[in-house]
Image (tube, grey):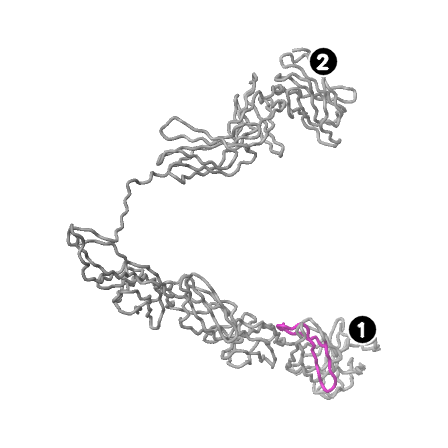
Amino acid sequence: MGVMKWLVTSVFLCISSQVAAQSGFELSQFSATSKTVFLKWTRYVGAESYRISTALTSSPNDTIGFVLFGPNTLLGSISYLSQGVEYIFTVEALDGSQRVLSSASINATTAPDRMDPIQTIKPKNSKTLIVEFNLKNGVSQYIIRVEDKQGFFREDRVSSSPAEITNLTPYTEYTLSIMAVSSAGRSQPSTPVTGKTVLPPPQFFTSSPTNDSIVVSWAPVDNAVQYTVSIHKFGFNTEIKYNTSDTNLTVSGLEAGLLYMIKSSAWDPIGRNGEDSLYKNQTTRPPAPSSVNVEQNVTCNTTSTSCILPVGCGELHTFQVIASNEAGPSYPSIPVVFITFPCPPEFLAHAPSSDGNCTLTWNRVPYADKYEAFIKTGDGSEENCNTTSNNCTYRCLCGHTYLMSVLAFNEAGSSPHGKVINYTTVPCCPENVAVSAVSTDTLEITWTASLGAELYETTAADALEVILCNDTAPVCALSDLSCDRAYSVVVTPCNDISGCNRACKAHTKDTAPCAPSNLQLTLQNSTVSVSWTANNRKANYTVTADGDGVRHICTTSGNSCNITDLSCGSIYEFSVSAASAAGPSLPSYTKSHETEPCCPMNITVDQVTEAMTNVTWSQAKGAHSFITSLTSPRGHARCHTQDSHCLMGCITCGTNYSVTMETYSPSGHMSTCTYQGFSSSPCCPSGVKLYRTTDNSFQVYWRSTGGQHSIIAELLGSNNSYNCTALPGQNSCSIGNIQCGDVFHVIVAPLTVEGKKILFCPQRLYSVTCLGSSIGTVIYRGKRSLD
């Protein structure tokens, strides 16, 4: 092998720089041809260039060339190598100073060298070409590439020469090239050569019109200019070939009753014979019989006393006998008239009649004395009818086929058998017809399959419409029927021969009632009056109201109904449906109704101050907001809230109030609720004053409220507390043994019936000084609330 003079490199892929984590540096073979090896490598971070060197594996240290690539090249090729040789390739990642940062090596072998062109191409048949080529050392397999001008492309793998290329198109030119394959890859395709398949065999037909000839005919073969037909007589070694440009050939002069084997082929314009067809066998017709004698006498010569003469049916003959001897003939005998047997009756016809009887008629024939009709059924039974007329009545059943013939009789015998006619009666009417409603607008009809029926025509009709269903099965569904109608249902059996039996009885069936419409709801307290439009002849109606997991129902035969005892604060779905003996209707469209919200079960009124109360209440189903009112002749208080409590001011002390509430649902429905009355607390006394009296005592004064409650006065000091009580109507009370030098909160409040002090009355603040051991000055410090 000579020393490599230069290296040619190609750069196939450039990848833009990207930041990546440092990984192993790898080199791999991308592909190889006989002169070029394609290599790819991984990016090495920091590399400014890549150097690929190559050497023979037999001398790995003798570099025969190298190539430099830029930092973004990761795929390249080295060309002008030797075919089928193993090399070692080394890639080195270099920095800017051409120092080696990392390296990797692989061994790779170049593919085989380009093959010589295919030596010969010859057709085997119209779809197969045989190719011959020179074998190549070190190659285990070959690829033959097949192409045509219409875009056909295929590659076949073969192992030796010659090789067959199959499944091609007849009379088509192909371009063929060959490639050698080894473990390193495939060689470049050889120089292409062309080959053409031959014409396909004609598709021919044969016949023998005479006992000495065979006719061969075929469809034209595209591109054929001539045809060859070969005929080989079975059992002989001779073969005769005929050439023609026509598409048919008559071969004469053949032997009668012999088997001949025939094949054909077509020739193209350049004189190539196409693929031979398979042999087809054809026998010539048998030889005609010989020594055939036909005699017909109109006279009869005999030496006996009888003679046979041929006669036909329905003929009148006059016979005379003449005796002869050597002297001559005698006078004719007295003529004898003879009538032959009658001819068979013609123009047989049948006519159906009532009550399951049919009539067979025919034309009278000459010289017939009587007739006998034969009526045979499909089950093998037979009925005979003897008559002197030209008709016969017989029992005919539905769904049967009858075979009928007629013989004529006279003294000479019966007529020959004449024409046999058949008559098929109409199919039988179905039995066990059942009509049932499977939905509000659909009837299902079932029946037992009837004799002679091939198809069933099912109709449902009323005064306004007819619904039709045709089916071969003994079941039918008629849908899209109108509600609350009486339909007449008829199942009519039919067949192609006798038509349909229109005498089957009808079955009446009502459809389900119509769904109620125009649903209206009217609220009356806890009762909802439901009304609707009813368009049914006769039906019962059921109204349902569903809500809170409970269903309320009312029924009626009219067009309105009341649903009672509905729960407050609930939403009900109302619908109405109709029912009759024909079944239930579809339900009406639903309407929703919201009942009035419930009233709270419990309400509590607590007085917070002399003029303010806190009202609380329990939850109320369906209530969204509340208006609570406290009403009295002396005034009223009111609050509007979504909560379950509210504060109300403007309360007058010592007053009886009525307690009412209005609850509202989210949609605006309202309920009025009334509760037990509320009495405000007694009024707190006003004008409270504290006066010093003798013996360290105080006298507490106030303006009388005029109420019916006792009054308690309290002095609450930092060290001591004192109190006194006044009866209803009194306006003062005395407190003794007061300790001086303290500040007192003075509270005057009425007592409840239970003896409890009203807690929200105001207090007054007094300072009491000492004068020696006695009370000194009483100083009013102001009025303040209890807290």
Amino acid type of disc 1? Gly
SS label for mark 2: loop
**Marks 2 and 1: which is nearer the front?**
2
Callout 2 crowding tier (Cα within 10 Å): few <14, some 14–19, many ≥20: few
- Quarter of the rendering occupied by the N terminus: top right
Residue 518 position, x and y percent, is: 60, 76
Furthest residue to the top? 2
| Residue 660, quarter of picture | bottom right
Which dot marks residue 116?
none
Q: Specify whether 505 is left or right of 341.
A: right
Q: Are marks 2 and 1 in contact (CB under 8 Å)?
A: no
- Quarter of the rendering occupied by the C terminus: bottom right
Callout 1 crowding tier (Cα within 10 Å): few <14, some 14–19, many ≥20: some
Residue 298 position, x and y percent, is: 26, 53
The residue pinned by badge 1 equals 741
Q: Specify whether 689 is left or right of 474.
A: right
The residue closer to the viewer here, 67 or 775, is 67
> Residue at position x 37%, y 27% from top?
236
The residue closer to the viewer here, 593 or 526, is 593
The residue pinned by badge 2 equals 5
Q: Is residue 688 above or below residue 499?
A: below
The residue closer to the viewer here, 349 or 451, is 349
Residue 82 position, x and y percent, is: 65, 16
